[in-house]
Amino acid sequence: MDRIPILRMGEFLLVTIQVDMHDQLALALQDDLSERISRTSARGVLLDISALDIVDSFIGRMISTISGLSKIMDAETVVVGMQPAVAITLVELGLTMPGVLTALDVERGMNLLRERVQTQ
Amino acid sequence: MTAASSGSHPVRTEQDVVLARQQVRKLAVSSGLRLVDQTKLVTAASELARNTVIYGGGGDMDWEVVEEGIRKGVRLVFRDEGPGIPDMKLAMTDGWTSGGGLGLGLTGARRLVDEFSLESAPGNGTRVTICKWS
Ligand SMILES: Nc1ncnc2c1ncn2[C@@H]1O[C@H](COP(=O)(O)OP(=O)(O)O)[C@@H](O)[C@H]1O
Ligand SMILES: [Mg+2]
C-alpha cells in the first residue's frame, strides 16, 4: 500500500498531502505519524493540506485525531494551507475542529510552531 | 428541466469513492458551478458515497447534468440495496452515527446542496438524491 511521506525538518515533522486520499491512506498516516513522533521526539508537526480540494468529515476527523495525538505525545500540530473554498465548506458541513491550530502557509505555520514550542 | 447528459458510476470500494469525487468535480466544472459550489457538491458526494460503501454494502452513483432555462446543475443519486435506514429522523440528526463516524454526512450533505431527498426502508436499501445549481 502507498503511504504519505513524512519529512523531518530539525525538531519538526512535515507532512504534505498531495493526493486525493482514500480512507485507508488517511488512517495509515495517523499511525505512521504517531510512530514517527515517538521515534524522533519531534516537538511539532506541520500538516500541509494546500493540495486538498475537499475536506470531508472523514479527513476532518483524521486532522483532529492527528492534532490530539500529537498533543498527548508532547508535540503540537499546525494545519497549513487550507483553501478558502474548503474552509467555507467545512463550516457548512458542521465540522469544527476545536483545538486544531491553523496557519495560512508553511512559513507562518513554522513560526507558530516555534512560538508554541518555546513557550512550553 | 432536461438532462443534457447522464451516466452511472460504481460505488463499491474506497477507491470508487475517490473516483466518484473526481467525476463529480468534472461535472461541476462543466456545469459552470463556481469554485465554492463545486467544493460543496464534491464534499457532499464524498459523504454520501462513503455511506453507500460502508453502510449500504456498495451501490451506484447515477449522475445527470440538468438544465432549466439558463441555469445548469448537477443531480446525483446514490443508491444501494443494503439494510436501509430504520429511523430516518435519527439518521438526519447532527452528530448521530450508528458506526464510528462523526454523524455529519447526511445532515452536512443536506446543508451543502440545493436539493436533498432521502428515501429508505428497512431491508429495501437507501437512495439519496442531491442537486446543486449554478
Ligand atoms: N446508505 C446507507 N445505508 C444504511 N444506513 C445508512 C446509509 N447512509 C447513512 N446511514 C445511517 O445513517 C447514519 C448517519 O450517517 P452520516 O450522517 O453519514 O454519519 P456517519 O457516516 O458518520 O455515521 C449512519 O451512521 C448510518 O446508520
Ligand atoms: Mg457518513
Image (cartoon, coloured by chain):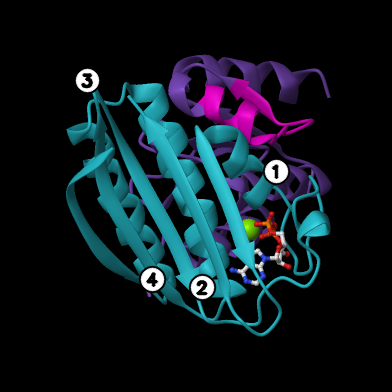
User: How many other residues sit within 10 Å of disc 1, few (<14), some (14-19) or many (≥20)?
Assistant: some
Q: Spatial distance from mark 2 to mark 4, Cα to Cα?
A: 9 Å
Q: Tags 3 and 4 in contact by the CB under 8 Å rule?
A: no
**Position of residue A42 in the picture relative to residue B67 (left or right):** right
Q: Spatial distance from mark 3 to mark 4, Cα to Cα?
A: 29 Å
Q: Which x, y percent locates residue A31?
A: 61, 64
Residue labelled with disc 3: B70
Residue A12 in view in this figure: yes
Q: Give the residues in magenta.
A: A87-102
Question: Which is closer to the viewer, label 2 or label 1?
Answer: 2
User: Does the magenta-highlighted stretch encompass residue A97?
Assistant: yes
Kind of residue at badge 2? Val
Q: Spatial distance from mark 2 to mark 1, Cα to Cα?
A: 23 Å
Kind of residue at badge 4? Asp
Q: Tags 2 and 3 in contact by the CB under 8 Å rule?
A: no
Residue B70's image quarter?
A: top left
What secondary structure is found at the residue carrying circle 2?
A: helix
Which disc is residue B61 wearing?
none
